[in-house]
Image (cartoon, helix red, strand yellow):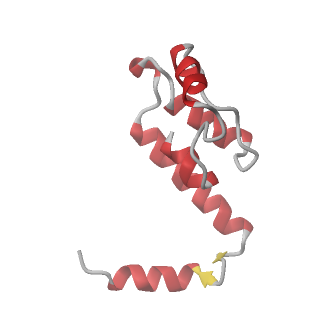
Amino acid sequence: MCIIEVVTGKCPWGDMADTVVIEAVKEKKIPTQPTTFKDNEWKLVTRMCRFDPQKRVGIGAVIKFLEDIGVRNLIDTGGVIGSTTVDSLRTAHTKEKF
């Protein structure tokens, strides 16, 4: 659920009373799709939030999906993220020390 908060800036079910949220979780419901999520992104969220751990998507698939989204966004913006270019990010990254 934290991915919902990261993307929207709001807590999942933040506008609902605690008792209503508790009932929703008992009924194995997840929040409704926020408008900030594209359908394919929300599909990933629902796969990550499955109640049966055996049916949840693996972390490798999540990482691959997020990488693909990042690449598509870079292509769509011509390599610009806000006022930052991909080249400047690459240069900054290679100078980092771990």
Kindly identify the residue that appears in the image at 50 percent across and 33 percent down. Answer: 48
The quarter of the image holding the C terminus is bottom left
| Residue at the left extreme of this rendering | 98
Q: Residue furthest right?
A: 35
Up the image or down, 86 lies above or below 14; here it is below
Observer-nearest residue: 39 or 33? 33
Give the x, y percent position of residue 32.
69, 32
Residue 46 sits in which quadrant?
top right
Image side of residue 36 versus residue 61, left or right: right
Tell how many labels.
0
Q: Quadrant of residue 85?
A: bottom right
The single residue placed furthest to the top in the displayed view is 27
Give x and y (percent) for residue 2.
49, 45
Residue 38, x across and y down, in percent: 73, 45
Q: In this rendering, would 93 be left or right of 45?
A: left
Q: Is residue 64 above or below residue 18?
A: below
Residue at image position (58%, 37%) is 44
Q: Nearer the viewer, residue 52 or 32?
A: 32
Where residue 61 sits in the image (x, y, percent)? 47, 39
